[in-house]
Image: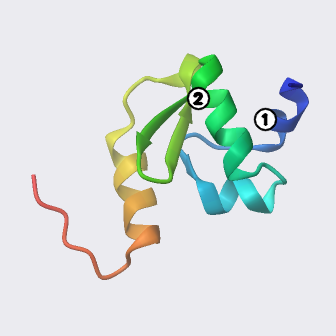
Amino acid sequence: MDNSILKKIKKSPFDAEYASTKGVSRRMLSYYVKSGRLVRLSYGVYAFSDELGFDFEGIIKEKLIQAPQAVIGL
C-alpha cells in the first residue's frame, strides 16, 4: 500500500475516528500496524512508529476525547 495515504494524518498519536476523517479506514490502520509503520497504543489510538518518543500527554488527551467523562488513574 501507498504511504501517501498516511501523509494525510498530521498528528501523532491519533485516534481511528481522526484517521477516518482523513480517508484512512480501520482496515488500513490494521495493515499499517502489521507492516510496522504504525503502533497501536491503545484501543483506537495509534502513533507513527518513527515518532514513538513516548508522548504521555498526547495519549491521555486522545483517551479523554474518546471518553470525556473518564477518570484517568495512574
| Image quarter hosting the N terminus | top right
Residue holding disc 2: 33
58 to 4, vertically: above or below: below
User: In the rendered view, does 46 fall on the left or right side of 16?
Assistant: left
Q: Is residue 4 left or right of residue 36?
A: right
Residue sitting at the far left: 74
Neighbor class of circle 2 (other Cα within 10 Å; few <14, some 14-19, many 20+) is some
Amino acid type, label 1: Leu
Give the number of the disc on residue 32: none
Residue 62, how many percent across, how many down?
45, 58
Q: Residue at x 42, y 52 (%)?
A: 43
Give SS at disc 2: helix
Please tell me whether residue 47 is drawn above or below residue 14 in the rendered image.
above
Question: What residue is disc 1 on?
Answer: 6
Q: Residue furthest bottom?
A: 69
Count of marks placed on residues: 2
Cβ–Cβ under 8 Å for marks 2 and 1: no
| Residue mark closest to the camera, 2 vs 1 | 2
Q: Give the class, few, some or many, for how many residues have Cα within 10 Å of label 1's Cα (few <14, many ≥20).
A: some
Instruction: Identify the coloring.
Output: rainbow
Instruction: Say which residue appears at 67% left-offset and 59% top-offset.
Output: 18
Whether residue 10 is visible to the viewer of this picture, yes or no, is no
